[in-house]
Each structure stands twice: as structure tokens, then as C-alpha cells.
Image: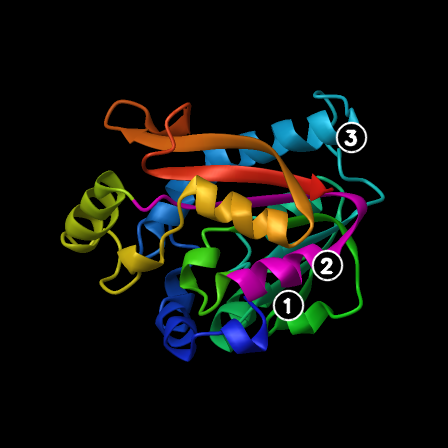
Amino acid sequence: MMDASTVDAREAAHFGAMAAEWWDPTGSSAMLHRLNPPRLTYLRARIDAHWGGDAASFTPLAGKRALDMGCGAGLLAEPLARMGAAVTGVDASAEVIAVARAHAGSLAIDYRVGGVEAVAGERFDLVTSLEVIEHVVDPGVFVHGLAAALAPGGLLVLSTPNRTPLSRLAMITLAEGTGRIPRGTHDHAKFLTPDELTRLLDGAGLRVTDVQGLAFSPGRGFHLSDSTALDYFVTAVGS
């Protein structure tokens, strides 16, 4: 899910151990399943805004190449393929990629084990990397790798937890403390603030065009929000 110099072998092993349950909405990846609807809502809105697409179209990515870096077992890669994209999914865990390939069925997704070096020299119209950057060793190198994979006129969408007291309480104290997320999934010190991530993107030659929060409430679950205190999305394009 990242450049070779930024891959954390412990992180890859941690997520590899969860591979068999990745598609179980009640298993160890249950939180990812709950995150996916607002993630897809945000992503579709950015796709339509960037390319002037028809919001009623089922295939807004027809004719485009998409890269999902840190794809896990395909929770995002599969919907991208159904939107019409030629999808490449890359993840550092061989166990997770094996599950992704088995689950894809008739979807022609190019799954690869590795990091951004796995797509060296290739360019993609859409690059996504959701809830990944907080697991890499060197976020700056990782962002530069994503920027190098972005085609001229392309769209980059990231998401990551913010480094705030709320994210520590919600994701580590509560979610990991109660077993809703496997213990050791997050390191609060590695979370990035929106300003920090924006500076990394600027340094990689990209321009941030949108930032939106992802919040949680008992009544609504995960939903898009003006607050970035828990988690947030960033959209960027070539500057």
C-alpha cells in the first residue's frame, strides 16, 4: 500500500491477519464496511464535479484508469470497477490481495502486491488512498509516490483520521478498547492534521481543491460533515 521505503512490515502483517474476515460486515473489518457508504458518496461527488459528469450515470469512470493504493480486499476497488474504470488495486499484504482476487469474481481488477513502486511509470486518471497514509513509515515519500502516479488532469482523493483528542478517544480508547477495531490498528501520533496533509500535497506539486470531514453520531452512523475533528477527505489535482 506504499512505496518500499515507507512500508511498515508490522502494519502489513497486522492487516494480513485480518484478511479472511475482510468482507464480513460483522468481522474485524466491520468499521470499514460502515465507512464505505459516505466514502463512496464523497468520491462520486468529486468525480462528477471534476469531470462534469452526469450524476444519474452508472458509469462515470468509463474510459478512465483508477488506482486504489492500499486497497485492502477491494471494498473501494470493486465499486470503482462497477463505475466503469479500469482499476488497479495495490496493497502491501499478500494475504489481503489473495482475498481481493478471490472476491472480485467477474470484475477485471488488476490486483498487485506491493507499494507505489508496483505502478512505477504508470499514470492514472483517478488515484484514491483511503485510511492508508496513517499506516506508512514516511508520509511525504508516500504522497510523492501518489503524485507521480497521477495523470495530467487527474484527480487524487485521500482520507485519514485527524490528530485530535476526539480521534484518540473514538478510534483508540473506545473502538480499539472495546474490540470494535482490532487492537494496534492505529497509532495516534501518526495521524495527520488537514494542514499537515495539505503541506505534503503542496510539496508534491499538487493543489488541494476540497477538504470535507467525516463524522460519527449514534443516530446517523458515519456521515459527511463540516467538522474534520474525527476524520476527513482531501481532494487534490495537479498544480
Judge the density around disc 1: few (<14), some (14-19), many (≥20) Cα neighbours within 10 Å: many
Q: CA distance from mark 2 to mark 3?
A: 18 Å
Mark closest to the chain's N terminus, 1 or 2:
1
Give the residues drawn in magenta, as a range: 140-163
- Residue at image location 39% in from the left, 71% down from the top: 11
Q: Where's the C terminus, which quadrant? A: top right
Tell me the amino acid under the disc marked 3.
Trp
Q: Which amino acid type is shown beneath numbered disc 2?
A: Ala
Could you tell me residue 210's position as x and y percent?
A: 58, 31
N-terminal of the pair, mark 3 or mark 1, is: 3
Q: Earlier in the sequence, mark 2 or mark 3?
A: 3
- The relative height of residue 228 versus residue 164 in the rendered view (above or below) is above
**Res. 107 visible in picture:** no
Determine which of the numbered discs, if any, sits on residue 51 in the image: 3
- Residue 194 vertical placement versus 20 (above, below): above
Residue beneath disc 2: 149
- CB atoms at circles 1 and 2 under 8 Å apart? yes
Q: Nearer the viewer, residue 87 or 190?
A: 190
Residue 7 included in the magenta stretch of the image = no
Give SS at disc 3. Answer: helix
- Identify the mark at residue 116; answer none if there is no mark: 1
Q: Position of residue 15 (x, y in %)?
A: 39, 68
Q: Nearer the viewer, mark 2 or mark 3?
A: 2
* Secondary structure category for the residue under label 1: helix
Q: How is the image coloured?
A: rainbow
Residue 177 visible to an observer of this rendering: yes
Please report the residue visible at 74 percent of the width from the left and 26 percent of the height from the top: 57
Q: Position of residue 100 (x, y in %)?
A: 56, 63
Q: Is residue 142 above or below residue 210?
A: below
The quadrant in which the N terminus is found is bottom right
Where disc 2 sits, the SS reads: helix
